[in-house]
Amino acid sequence: MSRNQHSRKTRFAKRSLGQNFLVDDGIIHRIVDSAGDLSEKLVLEIGPGRGALTDLLVERSGQYRAIELDTILAEKLKSRFEGIEKVEIFEADVLEADLEKILAPSEGIEGAVIVANLPYNISSAVIERLAEVSEMFAEAILMLQSEVVDRLAAPPGNSSRGFLTVLTEYVFEAKRLFSVTPNCFRPRPKVQSAVASLRPIGRSRDDDFPRLRNLVSVAFRQKRKTILNNLKGFSGVHDPVPLLEAAGIDTKLRPEALTIEEWIKLAKVIGADSSAGE
Ligand code: SAM
């Protein structure tokens, strides 16, 4: 592609839709290879854009579906794959789409895998949405901002740990796969990127989940404070000390030090004590 063609295409990328298109063939192959054998799987691609990953995904998958919000790009993809039965392109917002329906595989297809170079402005919201439908797929391979991947995979004690880490850990095993430099995209993003794998671990979101979500959200509001001090702001908790003691958690710890098991225990103890956090 000539320089002029490149810059014309770059100019038409919509920033509001997080459009940074992949142009590096090596990275495109690495992402699709990370998804493993797709021949009997349904692949859902979120934000296929100009189709950088799409040809390979269509070629390798048993069934392919995509959700693209940009009308022009969705229309182009629809005409490009017209007549190919296993391909369906949905023009929709992934945050509002009926994912349960879109992830339901046709007969003869063995489960679903999600692949996406996500728009970074909505990546946390997409991960939360994917957590809600985690029983519908086996793995998500996601290109994210490198910093977000660090946060998702941050172990207890790591300062990158936060609300999104704990929520992700409740539902997924998160792994950083590899880094991707801005040069691999047009236009180039201002941040470093990385590809992550999220594999649902089969923990069901029971009745305590909404309380856990609220608790973690409140507890990480001021990361430098202790868990004890942060819990003082949690609705319905009058004295956090006995609750933390009952959950076996040191009151002087910062929220980032707690393991997922400790968060689950704490949410249960608080729930048993009152209707706090509801
Ligand atoms: N997959 C392409 C690639 O790798 O070159 C494009 C990736 S680009 C980072 C993100 C894509 O997501 C764009 O095509 C954008 O239009 C689309 N998008 C943005 N917001 C979306 C939303 N809410 N729902 C579905 N697609 C969205």
Image (cartoon, rainbow, N blue to C red):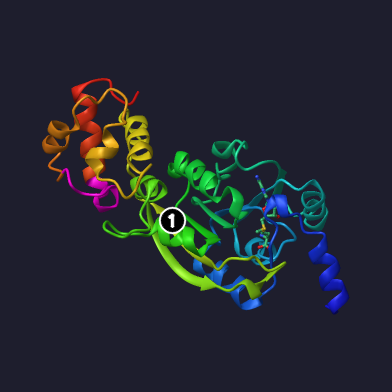
The quadrant where residue 52 appears: bottom right
The quadrant where residue 274 appears: top left
Ligand 1 shows up in the quarter that is bottom right
Q: Which quadrant does the C terminus fall into?
A: top left
Question: Which amino acid lies under the numbered mark 1 shown in the image of this protein?
Answer: Leu
Looking at the rendering, the stretch of residues picked out in magenta corresponds to: 251-261
Q: Residue at x 86, y 67 (%)?
A: 8
Q: Position of 71 compared to 86: left or right?
A: right
* x then y, percent, for residue 167: 38, 45
* x then y, percent, for residue 94: 62, 43
Q: Residue at x 79, y 51 (%)?
A: 78
Residue matched to label 1: 198
Mark 1 is surrounded, within 10 Å at the Cα level, by few (under 14), some (14 to 19) or many (20 or more) other residues, namely many
Total marks in image: 1
Reply above or below: 68 against 243.
below
Q: Position of 232 compared to 144: left or right?
A: left
Q: Position of 253 compared to 94: left or right?
A: left
* x then y, percent, for residue 90: 70, 44
Q: Is residue 255 magenta?
A: yes
Q: Residue at x 29, y 52 (%)?
A: 256
Q: From this viewpoint, is residue 35 visible?
A: no
- In-front residue for pair 85/238: 238
* x then y, percent, for residue 250: 14, 46
The quadrant where residue 96 appears: top right
